[in-house]
Amino acid sequence: MGQSFRVAAASVAVGIALGSLAALAAESRVVQTGKAFEPKVLTVKAGNTVTFVNEDFYDHNVYSDSVGNVFNLGIQPPGQTNGVTLATAGIVDVRCRIHPKMKLVVTVE
């Protein structure tokens, strides 16, 4: 086995390990603006974190009553960032208690 082959194999192994760590620490960002979520549809892996960033002029109260992924971030004033880890596979219906027309659907795989 030549030196260049060993270096290439080691590089691939390191890349795979780093990719696995990135997948474990994956984070998705959802912005609240104009009394809406952006994006409105999101897919994440179970155990990943969804970060909610309030870039709106209004307070929000992001929550979900979806089985296996129930959460309530409470009052989130403009400029605040909160995260939630979605642990259970399925469809998560995310809403704002203050603005009922705000809807986000997260598919957790």
Image (spheres, grey):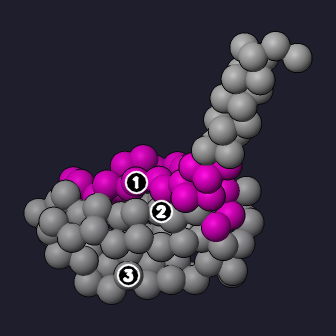
Q: Quadrant of residue 81?
A: bottom left
Say which of 91 and 48 sits in front.
48
Marks 1 and 2, how far apart at CA: 6 Å
Name which residue type carries label 2.
Val
Say which of 52 and 41 sits in front.
52
Q: Which residue is mark 3?
A: 73
What residue is rendered at 15% in x and 68% in y?
Answer: 78
Q: Quadrant of residue 69?
A: bottom right
Q: Secondary structure at mark 1?
A: strand
Q: Which residue is mark 1?
A: 29
Q: Residues within 10 Å of mark 1 (few under 14, many from 20)?
A: some
Residue 79 covered by magenta stretch: no
Q: Position of residue 19 (x, y in %)?
A: 63, 42
Say which of 13 and 26 sits in front.
13
Q: Which residues are magenta?
A: 20-47
Label 2 vs 3, first from the N-terminus = 2
